[in-house]
Protein backbone atom coordinates (compact mmCIF):
# COMPACT_ATOMS: atom_id res chain seq x y z
CA UNK A 1 0.00 0.00 0.00
CA UNK A 2 1.47 3.42 -0.96
CA UNK A 3 1.39 6.53 1.23
CA UNK A 4 -1.43 8.22 -0.73
CA UNK A 5 -3.78 5.28 -0.19
CA UNK A 6 -2.84 5.14 3.49
CA UNK A 7 -3.65 8.87 3.88
CA UNK A 8 -7.07 8.40 2.26
CA UNK A 9 -7.95 5.55 4.58
CA UNK A 10 -6.90 7.57 7.66
CA UNK A 11 -9.04 10.53 6.57
CA UNK A 12 -12.05 8.28 6.03
CA UNK A 13 -11.69 6.63 9.42
CA UNK A 14 -11.21 10.01 11.12
CA UNK A 15 -14.35 11.41 9.55
CA UNK A 16 -16.45 8.49 10.72
CA UNK A 17 -15.06 8.70 14.25
CA UNK A 18 -15.64 12.47 14.35
CA UNK A 19 -19.23 11.97 13.19
CA UNK A 20 -19.94 9.52 15.98
CA UNK A 21 -18.40 11.75 18.61
CA UNK A 22 -20.22 14.81 17.32
CA UNK A 23 -23.64 13.25 17.75
CA UNK A 24 -22.85 11.91 21.19
CA UNK A 25 -20.91 14.64 22.98
CA UNK A 26 -20.78 17.77 20.83
CA UNK A 27 -23.11 20.73 21.51
CA UNK A 28 -23.54 21.45 17.82
CA UNK A 29 -24.34 18.28 15.97
CA UNK A 30 -25.35 20.18 12.84
CA UNK A 31 -21.89 21.74 12.54
CA UNK A 32 -20.25 18.36 13.18
CA UNK A 33 -22.43 16.72 10.53
CA UNK A 34 -21.43 19.30 7.94
CA UNK A 35 -17.73 18.97 8.78
CA UNK A 36 -17.76 15.19 8.80
CA UNK A 37 -19.70 15.10 5.53
CA UNK A 38 -17.08 17.34 3.98
CA UNK A 39 -14.28 15.09 5.25
CA UNK A 40 -16.09 12.01 3.97
CA UNK A 41 -16.55 13.63 0.58
CA UNK A 42 -12.84 14.39 0.42
CA UNK A 43 -12.05 10.77 1.37
CA UNK A 44 -14.39 9.29 -1.23
CA UNK A 45 -13.11 11.66 -3.88
CA UNK A 46 -9.55 10.77 -3.01
CA UNK A 47 -10.34 7.07 -3.30
CA UNK A 48 -11.85 7.64 -6.75
CA UNK A 49 -8.81 9.61 -7.88
CA UNK A 50 -6.53 6.88 -6.47
CA UNK A 51 -8.37 4.13 -8.33
CA UNK A 52 -8.25 6.10 -11.58
CA UNK A 53 -4.58 6.94 -11.21
CA UNK A 54 -3.58 3.40 -10.27
CA UNK A 55 -2.60 1.34 -13.33
CA UNK A 56 -3.29 -2.39 -13.27
CA UNK A 57 -0.09 -4.37 -13.09
CA UNK A 58 0.66 -7.09 -15.62
CA UNK A 59 1.01 -10.62 -14.32
CA UNK A 60 4.61 -11.74 -14.34
CA UNK A 61 8.08 -10.43 -15.11
CA UNK A 62 9.17 -8.30 -18.04
CA UNK A 63 10.44 -10.69 -20.71
CA UNK A 64 12.10 -7.86 -22.63
CA UNK A 65 14.51 -7.30 -19.71
CA UNK A 66 15.22 -11.00 -19.19
CA UNK A 67 18.96 -11.76 -19.09
CA UNK A 68 19.36 -14.80 -21.30
CA UNK A 69 23.11 -15.03 -20.79
CA UNK A 70 22.80 -15.30 -17.01
CA UNK A 71 20.03 -17.88 -17.37
CA UNK A 72 22.07 -20.09 -19.72
CA UNK A 73 25.15 -19.84 -17.51
CA UNK A 74 23.06 -20.84 -14.52
CA UNK A 75 21.84 -23.85 -16.47
CA UNK A 76 25.41 -24.93 -17.21
CA UNK A 77 26.32 -24.54 -13.55
CA UNK A 78 23.38 -26.72 -12.53
CA UNK A 79 24.46 -29.33 -15.06
CA UNK A 80 27.86 -29.72 -13.38
CA UNK A 81 27.89 -32.96 -11.43
CA UNK A 82 24.76 -34.36 -13.04
CA UNK A 83 26.45 -36.14 -15.90
CA UNK A 84 27.44 -39.07 -13.70
CA UNK A 85 25.19 -41.49 -11.88
CA UNK A 86 24.63 -40.74 -8.24
CA UNK A 87 25.69 -37.10 -8.46
CA UNK A 88 23.27 -34.36 -7.53
CA UNK A 89 23.11 -30.61 -7.97
CA UNK A 90 23.66 -27.87 -5.45
CA UNK A 91 20.82 -25.76 -6.75
CA UNK A 92 17.24 -26.88 -7.09
CA UNK A 93 15.26 -25.41 -9.94
CA UNK A 94 11.62 -26.07 -9.18
CA UNK A 95 10.05 -22.96 -10.65
CA UNK A 96 10.38 -21.17 -13.97
CA UNK A 97 9.93 -17.43 -14.51
CA UNK A 98 6.38 -16.29 -15.26
CA UNK A 99 6.36 -13.50 -17.85
CA UNK A 100 3.65 -10.95 -18.56
CA UNK A 101 1.68 -11.24 -21.79
CA UNK A 102 2.39 -7.61 -22.70
CA UNK A 103 6.15 -8.20 -22.57
CA UNK A 104 5.87 -11.43 -24.60
CA UNK A 105 3.82 -9.55 -27.19
CA UNK A 106 6.43 -6.80 -27.32
CA UNK A 107 9.26 -9.32 -27.83
CA UNK A 108 7.48 -10.89 -30.82
CA UNK A 109 6.36 -7.58 -32.34
CA UNK A 110 2.78 -8.34 -31.37
CA UNK A 111 3.04 -11.89 -32.75
CA UNK A 112 3.59 -10.58 -36.26
CA UNK A 113 3.68 -12.92 -39.26
CA UNK A 114 7.20 -11.68 -39.99
CA UNK A 115 8.33 -13.25 -36.69
CA UNK A 116 6.54 -16.53 -37.26
CA UNK A 117 8.90 -19.51 -37.38
CA UNK A 118 6.31 -22.19 -38.09
CA UNK A 119 3.14 -23.81 -36.92
CA UNK A 120 2.19 -27.28 -35.77
CA UNK A 121 -0.82 -28.96 -34.27
CA UNK A 122 -0.14 -27.19 -30.97
CA UNK A 123 -0.11 -23.69 -32.44
CA UNK A 124 2.34 -21.18 -33.94
CA UNK A 125 5.94 -20.53 -32.88
CA UNK A 126 7.39 -17.03 -33.08
CA UNK A 127 10.85 -15.58 -32.89
CA UNK A 128 11.31 -13.00 -30.16
CA UNK A 129 14.05 -10.42 -29.60
CA UNK A 130 14.88 -9.02 -26.17
CA UNK A 131 16.27 -5.57 -25.31
CA UNK A 132 19.86 -6.84 -25.32
CA UNK A 133 19.35 -8.42 -28.73
CA UNK A 134 19.06 -12.00 -27.46
CA UNK A 135 16.77 -14.23 -29.50
CA UNK A 136 14.12 -16.55 -28.08
CA UNK A 137 11.40 -18.86 -29.41
CA UNK A 138 7.81 -18.34 -28.26
CA UNK A 139 5.27 -21.17 -28.58
CA UNK A 140 1.73 -19.80 -28.34
CA UNK A 141 -0.60 -22.70 -27.71
CA UNK A 142 -3.69 -22.64 -29.87
CA UNK A 143 -7.10 -22.93 -28.24
CA UNK A 144 -7.95 -25.72 -30.70
CA UNK A 145 -4.68 -27.63 -30.35
CA UNK A 146 -5.86 -29.93 -27.57
CA UNK A 147 -2.80 -28.99 -25.55
CA UNK A 148 -3.93 -27.01 -22.57
CA UNK A 149 -2.93 -25.82 -19.13
CA UNK A 150 -2.28 -29.37 -17.89
CA UNK A 151 0.30 -30.05 -20.60
CA UNK A 152 1.89 -26.62 -20.16
CA UNK A 153 2.27 -27.17 -16.42
CA UNK A 154 3.58 -30.67 -17.05
CA UNK A 155 6.27 -29.42 -19.40
CA UNK A 156 7.26 -26.62 -17.04
CA UNK A 157 7.44 -29.05 -14.11
CA UNK A 158 9.42 -31.70 -15.98
CA UNK A 159 11.91 -29.56 -17.84
CA UNK A 160 12.59 -27.33 -14.83
CA UNK A 161 14.04 -30.40 -13.13
CA UNK A 162 16.40 -31.43 -15.96
CA UNK A 163 19.35 -29.74 -17.63
CA UNK A 164 21.43 -31.31 -20.37
CA UNK A 165 23.18 -30.01 -23.47
CA UNK A 166 20.96 -32.20 -25.66
CA UNK A 167 17.69 -31.01 -24.11
CA UNK A 168 16.15 -27.71 -25.16
CA UNK A 169 16.03 -25.04 -22.45
CA UNK A 170 12.61 -23.80 -21.37
CA UNK A 171 13.17 -20.23 -20.17
CA UNK A 172 9.71 -19.51 -18.77
CA UNK A 173 6.03 -19.30 -19.52
CA UNK A 174 3.07 -16.95 -19.67
CA UNK A 175 -0.37 -17.81 -18.32
CA UNK A 176 -2.63 -14.78 -18.56
CA UNK A 177 -6.38 -14.94 -19.21
CA UNK A 178 -6.79 -17.50 -22.01
CA UNK A 179 -3.16 -17.30 -23.13
CA UNK A 180 -0.86 -20.31 -22.66
CA UNK A 181 2.66 -19.54 -23.85
CA UNK A 182 6.04 -21.24 -23.48
CA UNK A 183 9.36 -19.42 -24.01
CA UNK A 184 12.40 -21.43 -25.15
CA UNK A 185 15.97 -20.78 -26.13
CA UNK A 186 16.11 -20.01 -29.85
CA UNK A 187 17.26 -22.76 -32.21
CA UNK A 188 18.27 -21.05 -35.50
CA UNK A 189 18.24 -24.26 -37.56
CA UNK A 190 14.68 -25.23 -36.61
CA UNK A 191 13.92 -28.95 -36.34
CA UNK A 192 15.54 -32.05 -37.81
CA UNK A 193 12.61 -32.88 -40.09
CA UNK A 194 13.00 -29.46 -41.73
CA UNK A 195 16.27 -30.70 -43.26
CA UNK A 196 15.83 -34.45 -43.30
CA UNK A 197 12.76 -34.74 -45.52
CA UNK A 198 13.64 -31.98 -47.99
CA UNK A 199 15.49 -33.13 -51.12
CA UNK A 200 17.61 -29.98 -51.19
CA UNK A 201 18.19 -29.25 -47.50
CA UNK A 202 19.07 -32.86 -46.66
CA UNK A 203 22.33 -32.35 -48.59
CA UNK A 204 23.50 -30.21 -45.69
CA UNK A 205 23.39 -33.28 -43.47
CA UNK A 206 26.64 -35.08 -44.22
CA UNK A 207 27.58 -38.32 -42.49
CA UNK A 208 29.52 -36.60 -39.70
CA UNK A 209 26.59 -34.30 -38.91
CA UNK A 210 24.12 -37.18 -38.87
CA UNK A 211 26.31 -39.20 -36.52
CA UNK A 212 26.58 -36.19 -34.19
CA UNK A 213 22.80 -35.83 -34.20
CA UNK A 214 22.25 -39.55 -33.57
CA UNK A 215 24.69 -39.64 -30.67
CA UNK A 216 23.36 -36.39 -29.21
CA UNK A 217 19.76 -37.61 -29.20
CA UNK A 218 20.89 -40.90 -27.64
CA UNK A 219 22.76 -39.03 -24.91
CA UNK A 220 19.74 -36.83 -24.22
CA UNK A 221 17.45 -39.83 -23.82
CA UNK A 222 20.01 -41.64 -21.66
CA UNK A 223 20.09 -38.64 -19.34
CA UNK A 224 16.29 -38.59 -19.08
CA UNK A 225 16.08 -42.32 -18.40
CA UNK A 226 19.03 -42.79 -16.10
CA UNK A 227 20.98 -39.73 -14.96
CA UNK A 228 18.41 -37.02 -14.25
CA UNK A 229 17.04 -36.54 -10.74
CA UNK A 230 13.75 -38.04 -11.92
CA UNK A 231 13.46 -40.79 -14.52
CA UNK A 232 11.52 -39.23 -17.39
CA UNK A 233 9.78 -40.97 -20.31
CA UNK A 234 9.39 -38.53 -23.18
CA UNK A 235 6.58 -40.39 -25.03
CA UNK A 236 6.71 -38.19 -28.13
CA UNK A 237 10.21 -38.44 -29.57
CA UNK A 238 10.23 -37.71 -33.32
CA UNK A 239 12.28 -35.76 -35.83
CA UNK A 240 10.13 -32.63 -35.51
CA UNK A 241 10.81 -32.62 -31.75
CA UNK A 242 14.58 -32.62 -32.27
CA UNK A 243 15.77 -29.03 -32.64
CA UNK A 244 19.14 -27.98 -34.07
CA UNK A 245 21.32 -25.14 -32.79
CA UNK A 246 23.59 -23.02 -34.96
CA UNK A 247 26.25 -25.77 -34.94
CA UNK A 248 23.65 -28.42 -35.89
CA UNK A 249 23.80 -29.99 -32.44
CA UNK A 250 20.52 -31.71 -31.49
CA UNK A 251 18.27 -30.79 -28.57
CA UNK A 252 15.21 -32.82 -27.63
CA UNK A 253 12.12 -30.64 -27.12
CA UNK A 254 8.40 -30.81 -26.27
CA UNK A 255 7.90 -32.37 -22.85
CA UNK A 256 4.18 -31.66 -22.67
CA UNK A 257 3.24 -35.35 -22.51
CA UNK A 258 6.38 -36.61 -20.76
CA UNK A 259 5.87 -38.73 -17.67
CA UNK A 260 7.97 -39.21 -14.56
CA UNK A 261 8.70 -42.78 -13.52
CA UNK A 262 9.39 -43.46 -9.86
CA UNK A 263 10.15 -47.16 -10.15
CA UNK A 264 12.87 -49.24 -11.72
CA UNK A 265 13.85 -48.75 -15.34
CA UNK A 266 11.81 -51.75 -16.46
CA UNK A 267 8.64 -50.61 -14.72
CA UNK A 268 5.71 -50.28 -17.10
CA UNK A 269 2.79 -47.91 -16.71
CA UNK A 270 -0.65 -48.36 -18.23
CA UNK A 271 -2.86 -45.49 -19.33
CA UNK A 272 -6.12 -45.06 -21.21
CA UNK A 273 -4.94 -41.78 -22.70
CA UNK A 274 -2.69 -42.56 -25.67
CA UNK A 275 -0.72 -39.59 -26.93
CA UNK A 276 2.06 -39.37 -29.45
CA UNK A 277 2.59 -39.41 -33.20
CA UNK A 278 1.62 -42.22 -35.51
CA UNK A 279 4.74 -43.89 -36.87
CA UNK A 280 6.81 -43.35 -33.73
CA UNK A 281 4.65 -45.03 -31.08
CA UNK A 282 5.72 -48.41 -29.71
CA UNK A 283 3.23 -51.26 -30.29
CA UNK A 284 2.60 -52.00 -26.59
CA UNK A 285 1.69 -48.34 -26.09
CA UNK A 286 -0.36 -47.96 -29.28
CA UNK A 287 -2.47 -51.05 -28.70
CA UNK A 288 -2.39 -51.55 -24.93
CA UNK A 289 -1.63 -48.15 -23.42
CA UNK A 290 1.49 -49.57 -21.73
CA UNK A 291 4.58 -47.35 -21.78
CA UNK A 292 8.05 -47.46 -20.28
CA UNK A 293 11.53 -46.27 -21.14
CA UNK A 294 11.47 -48.97 -23.85
CA UNK A 295 8.73 -46.95 -25.58
CA UNK A 296 11.25 -44.13 -26.05
CA UNK A 297 13.81 -46.67 -27.27
CA UNK A 298 11.38 -47.72 -30.00
CA UNK A 299 10.86 -44.10 -31.05
CA UNK A 300 14.62 -43.60 -31.14
CA UNK A 301 14.99 -46.60 -33.45
CA UNK A 302 12.49 -45.08 -35.87
CA UNK A 303 14.30 -41.73 -35.75
CA UNK A 304 17.63 -43.46 -36.35
CA UNK A 305 16.33 -45.18 -39.49
CA UNK A 306 14.86 -41.89 -40.72
CA UNK A 307 18.19 -40.11 -40.20
CA UNK A 308 20.04 -42.80 -42.14
CA UNK A 309 17.58 -42.88 -45.03
CA UNK A 310 16.05 -39.36 -45.10
CA UNK A 311 12.70 -41.09 -45.48
CA UNK A 312 9.63 -40.95 -43.25
CA UNK A 313 8.53 -44.15 -41.57
CA UNK A 314 4.99 -43.61 -42.87
CA UNK A 315 5.94 -42.64 -46.43
CA UNK A 316 5.58 -46.07 -48.10
CA UNK A 317 1.92 -46.11 -49.10
CA UNK A 318 2.47 -46.83 -52.80
CA UNK A 319 5.31 -49.35 -52.38
CA UNK A 320 5.72 -53.04 -51.65
CA UNK A 321 6.94 -52.24 -48.13
CA UNK A 322 4.55 -51.51 -45.28
CA UNK A 323 6.73 -48.76 -43.80
CA UNK A 324 10.36 -47.81 -43.28
CA UNK A 325 10.76 -50.50 -40.61
CA UNK A 326 9.59 -53.18 -43.02
CA UNK A 327 11.76 -51.78 -45.81
CA UNK A 328 14.86 -51.74 -43.61
CA UNK A 329 14.14 -55.27 -42.40
CA UNK A 330 13.88 -56.60 -45.95
CA UNK A 331 17.17 -54.95 -46.92
CA UNK A 332 18.82 -56.26 -43.76
CA UNK A 333 17.82 -59.85 -44.53
CA UNK A 334 19.09 -59.43 -48.10
CA UNK A 335 22.37 -57.85 -46.96
CA UNK A 336 21.59 -54.70 -48.97
CA UNK A 337 21.69 -52.07 -46.22
CA UNK A 338 23.42 -49.57 -48.52
CA UNK A 339 20.16 -49.34 -50.46
CA UNK A 340 18.61 -47.84 -47.33
CA UNK A 341 21.07 -44.96 -47.07
CA UNK A 342 20.22 -41.49 -48.32
CA UNK A 343 21.69 -41.18 -51.87
CA UNK A 344 23.38 -37.87 -50.94
CA UNK A 345 25.72 -39.89 -48.71
CA UNK A 346 26.50 -42.68 -51.15
CA UNK A 347 30.05 -41.52 -51.80
CA UNK A 348 30.77 -41.54 -48.07
CA UNK A 349 28.69 -44.65 -47.44
CA UNK A 350 30.49 -46.88 -49.93
CA UNK A 351 33.59 -46.89 -47.72
CA UNK A 352 31.63 -47.34 -44.49
CA UNK A 353 29.59 -50.44 -45.15
CA UNK A 354 30.50 -52.00 -41.80
CA UNK A 355 29.61 -48.85 -39.84
CA UNK A 356 26.32 -48.37 -41.70
CA UNK A 357 25.37 -52.00 -41.17
CA UNK A 358 26.07 -51.52 -37.48
CA UNK A 359 23.80 -48.46 -37.25
CA UNK A 360 20.98 -50.27 -39.07
CA UNK A 361 21.45 -53.24 -36.75
CA UNK A 362 21.15 -50.97 -33.70
CA UNK A 363 18.03 -49.31 -35.11
CA UNK A 364 16.38 -52.67 -35.79
CA UNK A 365 17.17 -53.82 -32.26
CA UNK A 366 15.37 -50.72 -30.96
CA UNK A 367 12.18 -51.31 -32.98
CA UNK A 368 11.64 -54.98 -32.13
CA UNK A 369 8.09 -56.02 -31.34
CA UNK A 370 8.57 -57.00 -27.70
CA UNK A 371 9.71 -54.28 -25.30
CA UNK A 372 11.84 -56.73 -23.34
CA UNK A 373 13.84 -57.55 -26.48
CA UNK A 374 14.85 -53.92 -27.01
CA UNK A 375 18.05 -52.54 -25.49
CA UNK A 376 18.07 -49.72 -22.95
CA UNK A 377 19.43 -46.33 -23.96
CA UNK A 378 22.53 -47.14 -21.92
CA UNK A 379 23.05 -50.18 -24.16
CA UNK A 380 22.35 -48.08 -27.26
CA UNK A 381 24.93 -45.43 -26.36
CA UNK A 382 27.48 -48.16 -25.66
CA UNK A 383 26.80 -49.79 -29.03
CA UNK A 384 27.04 -46.45 -30.86
CA UNK A 385 30.29 -45.38 -29.26
CA UNK A 386 32.06 -48.73 -28.95
CA UNK A 387 32.56 -50.18 -32.41
CA UNK A 388 34.14 -53.34 -30.98
CA UNK A 389 31.07 -54.23 -28.91
CA UNK A 390 29.28 -57.25 -30.44
CA UNK A 391 25.67 -56.83 -31.58
CA UNK A 392 22.83 -59.30 -31.34
CA UNK A 393 20.91 -60.12 -34.51
CA UNK A 394 17.58 -58.23 -34.55
CA UNK A 395 14.16 -59.83 -34.67
CA UNK A 396 11.44 -58.75 -37.06
CA UNK A 397 10.34 -55.15 -36.32
CA UNK A 398 6.93 -54.15 -35.02
CA UNK A 399 4.29 -53.00 -37.53
CA UNK A 400 5.92 -54.95 -40.36
CA UNK A 401 3.35 -57.78 -40.57
CA UNK A 402 0.02 -56.40 -41.76
CA UNK A 403 -0.79 -53.36 -43.83
CA UNK A 404 -3.71 -51.09 -42.98
CA UNK A 405 -5.23 -50.22 -46.39
CA UNK A 406 -5.98 -46.66 -45.31
CA UNK A 407 -2.38 -46.02 -44.30
CA UNK A 408 -3.48 -44.79 -40.87
CA UNK A 409 -4.61 -46.32 -37.58
CA UNK A 410 -7.95 -48.06 -37.76
CA UNK A 411 -10.75 -47.45 -35.29
CA UNK A 412 -9.87 -50.65 -33.49
CA UNK A 413 -6.26 -49.56 -33.05
CA UNK A 414 -6.13 -47.87 -29.67
CA UNK A 415 -3.54 -45.35 -30.78
CA UNK A 416 -5.73 -42.45 -31.75
CA UNK A 417 -8.15 -40.65 -29.47
CA UNK A 418 -9.74 -37.25 -29.36
CA UNK A 419 -7.83 -36.22 -26.25
CA UNK A 420 -4.47 -35.91 -27.99
CA UNK A 421 -2.52 -33.20 -26.20
CA UNK A 422 0.69 -32.27 -27.92
CA UNK A 423 0.88 -34.39 -31.05
CA UNK A 424 -1.56 -35.37 -33.71
CA UNK A 425 -1.71 -39.09 -34.29
CA UNK A 426 -1.11 -38.87 -37.98
CA UNK A 427 1.72 -39.15 -40.44
CA UNK A 428 4.05 -36.19 -40.68
Image: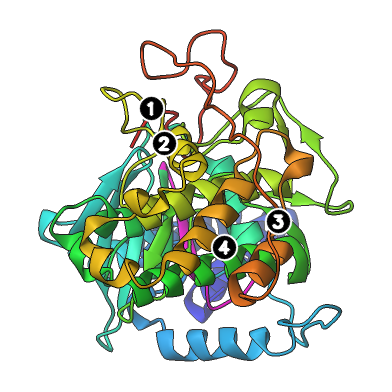
Q: Quadrant of residue 307?
A: bottom left
- Marks 1 and 4, Cα distance to the nearest angstrom? 83 Å
Comes first in the chain, label 4 or label 3:
4
- Image coordinates of residue 334 in percent, x first then y, are 46, 41
Q: Which residue is mark 1?
A: 321
Magenta stretch in the rendered image: 162-178
Comes first in the chain, label 1 or label 4:
4
User: Mark 2: few, some, or many residues within 10 Å (few <14, many ≥20)?
Assistant: some
Comes first in the chain, label 2 or label 4:
4
Disc 1 is placed on an element classified as: loop
Disc 2 and disc 4 in contact, CB within 8 angstroms: no
Give 78 or 138, whichever is nearer the viewer: 78
Q: Is residue 186 visible?
A: no
Instruction: Give the residue at x 45% y 63%.
Output: 356
Closer to the eye: label 2 or 4: 2
- Image coordinates of residue 405 in percent, x first then y, are 38, 10
Closer to the eye: label 4 or 3: 3
Instruction: Give the residue at x 52% y 77%.
Output: 2
Q: Which residue is mark 3?
A: 232
Amino acid sequence: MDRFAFFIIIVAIASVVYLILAFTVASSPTYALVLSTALATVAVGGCIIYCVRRKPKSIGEDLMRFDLEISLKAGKTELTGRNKPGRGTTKEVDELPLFSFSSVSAATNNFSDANKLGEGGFGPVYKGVLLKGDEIAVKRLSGTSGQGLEELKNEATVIAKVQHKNLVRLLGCCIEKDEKILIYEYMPNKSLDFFLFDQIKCKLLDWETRVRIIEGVAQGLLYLHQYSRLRIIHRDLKTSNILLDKAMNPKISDFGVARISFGESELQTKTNRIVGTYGYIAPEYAFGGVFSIKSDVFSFGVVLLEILSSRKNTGFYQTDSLNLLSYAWDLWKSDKVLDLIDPVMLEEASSMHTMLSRYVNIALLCVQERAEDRPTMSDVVSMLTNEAAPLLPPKQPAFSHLRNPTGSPSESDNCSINKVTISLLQAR
